[in-house]
Image: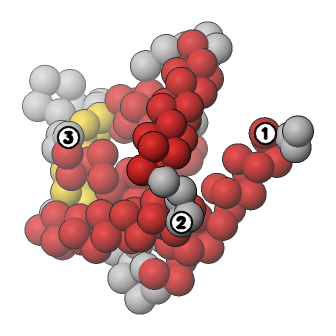
Amino acid sequence: MQSLNRLIGAISRCAALWRTERLAGTGVGPHDHPYLFYICHHPGVSQDALCRALYVNKSSVTRHIAHLEEEGFITRRPAENDRRVLQVFPTEKGMEALPLLRQVAAEWNAAITGGFSEQERELFSDLLERAMQNAKDKLEVKP
């Protein structure tokens, strides 16, 4: 059996290349989509909560948030109850990007499961869900 790390890594890198091509000219980078999805579905999320929700470190969140803000997809404001906490909100431009992001995600899902039967797609999804839960369970710091 091939190394799962190698296979998962290769799929992830292919997905980034796919998104780069499909999102060219939009201002959304290939690794920005999970941030924008989450922020649009959780307006006012703090940067710390975003770290925990997406399983990324603070420097990655800061870098992606800065890029999305520079491109006009999100804004940051201090929280009313604690001015040290920055809350992140989607802009109108950010919300307008969601249909394209959904379309690109759906196309990628269809591409990587091409040739799978419906039963195989469901099994693949179930197995990935279980693998993700196993990975989360191994983390010392839980979101």
Residue 78's image quarter? top left
Mark 2, secondary structure of its residue: loop
- Residue for point 45% across, 65% down: 110
Left or right: residue 27 versus residue 83 is right
Circle on res. 46: none
Can residue 6 be seen in this snapshot? yes
The residue wearing badge 1 is 4
Circle on res. 114: 2
Q: Earlier in the sequence, mark 3 or mark 1?
A: 1
Kindly identify the amino acid type of the residue bearing the numbered disc 1: Leu
Q: Earlier in the sequence, mark 2 or mark 1?
A: 1
Kindly identify the amino acid type of the residue bearing the numbered disc 2: Gly
State the quadrant of the N terminus. top right
Mark 1, secondary structure of its residue: helix
Residue 17's image quarter? bottom right
- Please state the horizontal and vertical placement of residue 69, each as a whole percent of the image: 32, 64
Q: Is residue 142 above or below residue 27?
A: above
Kindly identify the amino acid type of the residue bearing the numbered disc 3: His
State the quadrant of the C terminus. top left
Q: Is residue 80 above or below residue 143?
A: below
- Please state the horizontal and vertical placement of residue 49, each as a whole percent of the image: 35, 29
- Residue for point 29% across, 35% down: 46
- How far separated are the C-alphas under marks 2 and 1? 20 Å
The crowd level at tag 1 (other Cα within 10 Å; few <14, some 14-19, many 20+) is few
Q: Earlier in the sequence, mark 3 or mark 2?
A: 3
Q: Are marks 3 and 2 in contact (CB under 8 Å)?
A: no
Front one among 40 and 4: 4
Residue 92's image quarter? bottom left
The residue wearing badge 3 is 42
